[in-house]
């Protein structure tokens, strides 16, 4: 019997975000998961991924390079498109780079609010939450 690939899900609503096969180590980091501290002193245990389900993730805001945890990359905040919970960040390489280097991809994701727990119960999202997210997207 073929073993099924572990699905990475939103911790809040259980939406499928990615698969374990997309986890990787960014060049210069110490592994696939790291503890990173933002400018407010909040520690984020973050897993890096090459690919996500684009229907489950939405990025809001302009790319920023200030305080990037990965030198040479900008970041944009990423939310679950199902429940609007903060998942993590999309990182984009700034400037030129070696497109053949798998450890330094053009884009990747860093998520701190995901789980492999298949028992996370999907939750319905209120109309107000979806409306607020839609309004935010209009300004992006």
Image (cartoon, grey):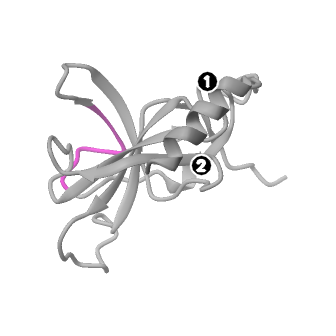
Residue 138: % across, % down: 52, 48
**Residue 75 is one of the magenta-drawn residues:** no
Q: Which residue is at the front of the view, 4 or 42?
A: 42
Q: Which residue is mark 2?
A: 18
Residue 54's quadrant in the figure? bottom right
Instruction: Identify the main secondary structure in magenta.
Output: loop
- Identify the disc placed on residue 35: none
Compared to residue 47, the image places residue 44 above or below, namely: above
Q: Which residue is mark 1?
A: 12
Q: Which residue is at the front of the view, 39 or 20?
A: 39
Residue 102: % across, % down: 34, 69
Determine the residue positioned at 26% across, 20% down. Answer: 42
Determine the residue positioned at 65% across, 53% down. Answer: 55
Compared to residue 62, the image places residue 13 above or below, namely: above
Residue 4: % across, % down: 74, 49
Determine the residue positioned at 23% across, 78% down. Answer: 98
Residue 130's quadrant in the figure? top right
Count the marks.
2
Compared to residue 63, the image places residue 43 above or below, namely: above
What kind of element bears circle 2? strand
Asked if residue 88 can be seen in this view, the reply is yes
Q: Residues within 10 Å of mark 2 (few under 14, many from 20)?
A: many
| Magenta extent | 28-35
The reply, left or right, for residue 56 in relation to residue 29 is right
Residue 69: % across, % down: 20, 43
Residue 15's quadrant in the figure? top right
């Amino acid at each position: 019997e073929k073993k099924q690939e572990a699905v990475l899900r939103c911790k809040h609503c259980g939406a499928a975000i990615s698969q374990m096969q997309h986890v990787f180590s960014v060049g210069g980091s110490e592994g696939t998961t790291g503890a990173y501290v933002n400018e407010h002193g909040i520690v984020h245990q973050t897993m890096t991924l090459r690919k996500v389900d684009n229907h489950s993730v939405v990025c809001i805001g302009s790319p920023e390079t200030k305080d990037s945890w990965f030198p040479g990359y900008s970041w944009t905040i990423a939310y679950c498109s199902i429940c609007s919970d903060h998942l993590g960040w999309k990182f984009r390489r700034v400037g030129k780079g070696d497109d053949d280097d798998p450890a330094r991809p053009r884009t990747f994701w860093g998520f701190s609010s995901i789980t492999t727990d298949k028992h996370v119960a999907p939750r319905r999202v209120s109309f107000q939450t979806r409306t607020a997210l839609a309004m935010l997207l209009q300004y992006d």
